[in-house]
């Protein structure tokens, strides 16, 4: 056992009998205060504002840090877009095998392969392909096509309200999200031209846009709202069981979160998650949301972890999220 793991175990083991689970009015039982203090201590090493919501699905025990504060979602908002798509599939309004033609105006900046590898005309992808690209590698071009097909941000928000999710809003496609972060006022495609325009902006103009982005209420969520959505997905309350199985399978194969919630968990822990990142060499927003399975029938834990307005170097924020994930894992492992 490493010194780090031993320290976490000592910090998280209870000193007395387990008290009642956290009540719905936001009160905290004594044992969960220990977990919240551990999360707060870890968050103290972050170079930005941290928000966390934790829910043990089987017992309902919860822990929070700044959980009702709004945080930029970045690509974690793609979970909500996926729900809107799969809802329409469940209602037989769309089919996952339907093909969508991709043209040059669909090639948007951001992570992914559609803009990089499929730039020539004549490409058509199924909605299933687009869903996987959106969730597995966080492809922005695929995301904006899916968002358009489901009816835009208003349609996604309407579905969230149907599910009783408050405190989360989807306002813009990723092309506008990225443009607003950098201060690019017009919507520019293809991606190569966007980079030229972005790089021509002054440092002062970009810094002003970054500062405005951190307080922009659009495309934000509270950690509590995202944890509620992830909980509903896992409990099969958001979409049909077959659609749920598909989405969870895709999230289990997420390729962008190796160093976040998964980062310090023991090998082999089952994790289904979706990350989000906005930044780079400027104020950074880093997050990871998902659910992991405890061993020995210990249940399932939802974690929504957000860091906003952090200093550059996303790796530092990733380590904070990884430490939070391990603290939560150890707590519920030793407090079944």
Image (spheres, helix red, strand yellow):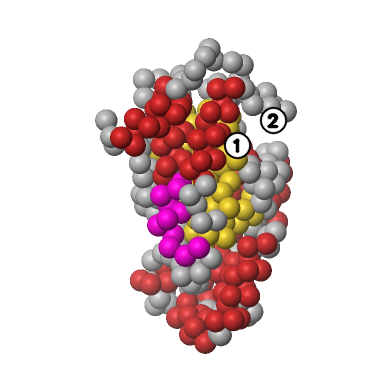
| Mark 2 residue element | loop
Q: Is residue 178 visible?
A: yes
Q: Is residue 150 visible?
A: no
Labels 1 & 2 near each other (Cβ < 8 A): yes
Return the x and y of residue 269 as percentages of the image width and height.
Answer: 35, 34
Q: Mark 1 — residue?
A: 64
Return the x and y of residue 326 as percentages of the image width and height.
Answer: 41, 37
Q: Which mark is residue 49?
A: none
Kindly indicate the quadrant of the structure image that contains residue 245. top left
Kindly indicate the quadrant of the structure image that contains residue 233. top right
Identify whether 163 is placed above or below 136: above
Magenta segment main secondary structure: helix
Q: Is 4 left, or right, of 50 in this rendering?
A: left
Identify whether 31 is placed above or below 7: above
Q: Is 214 left, or right, of 190 in this rendering?
A: right
Return the x and y of residue 42 as percentages of the image width and height.
Answer: 48, 43
Q: Which mark is residue 26?
A: 2
| Mark 1 residue element | strand
Query: Which portion, as a residue range, is magenta?
Result: 311-321
Q: Residue at x 55, y 81 (%)?
A: 203
Furthest toward the bottom, the residue is: 200
Q: CA distance from mark 1 to mark 2?
A: 9 Å
Q: Residue at x 50, y 63 (%)?
A: 311
Query: Is residue 143 magenta-colored?
Result: no
């Amino acid at each position: 056992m490493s010194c780090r793991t031993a320290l976490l175990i000592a910090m998280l083991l209870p000193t007395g009998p387990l008290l009642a689970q956290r009540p719905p009015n936001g009160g905290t039982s004594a044992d969960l205060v220990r977990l919240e203090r551990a999360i707060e201590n870890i968050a103290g090493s972050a170079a930005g504002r941290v928000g966390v919501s934790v829910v043990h699905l089987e017992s309902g025990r919860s822990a929070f840090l700044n959980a009702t504060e709004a945080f930029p979602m970045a690509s974690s908002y793609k979970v909500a877009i996926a729900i809107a798509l799969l809802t329409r599939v469940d209602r037989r309004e769309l089919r996952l095998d339907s093909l969508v033609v991709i043209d040059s105006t669909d090639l948007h900046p951001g992570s992914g392969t559609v803009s990089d590898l499929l730039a020539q005309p004549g490409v058509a992808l199924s909605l299933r392909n687009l869903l996987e690209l959106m969730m597995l590698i966080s492809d922005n071009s695929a995301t904006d096509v899916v968002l358009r097909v489901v009816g835009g941000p208003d349609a996604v928000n309407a579905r969230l309200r149907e599910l009783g999710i408050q405190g989360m809003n989807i306002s813009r496609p990723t092309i506008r999200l990225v443009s607003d972060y950098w201060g690019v006022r017009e919507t520019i495609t293809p991606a190569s031209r966007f980079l030229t325009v972005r790089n021509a902006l002054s440092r002062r103009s970009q810094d002003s846009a970054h500062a405005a982005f951190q307080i922009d209420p659009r495309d934000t969520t509270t950690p509590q709202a995202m944890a509620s959505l992830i909980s509903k997905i896992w409990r099969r309350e958001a979409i049909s069981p077959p659609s749920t199985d598909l989405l969870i399978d895709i999230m289990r194969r997420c390729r962008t979160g190796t160093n976040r919630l998964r980062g310090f968990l023991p090998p082999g822990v089952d994790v289904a998650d979706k990350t989000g990142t906005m930044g780079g060499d400027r104020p950074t927003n880093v997050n990871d949301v998902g659910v992991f399975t405890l061993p020995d029938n210990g249940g399932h834990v939802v974690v929504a972890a957000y860091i906003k307005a952090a200093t550059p170097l996303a790796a530092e924020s990733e380590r904070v999220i990884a430490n939070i994930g391990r603290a939560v894992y150890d707590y519920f492992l030793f407090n079944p």
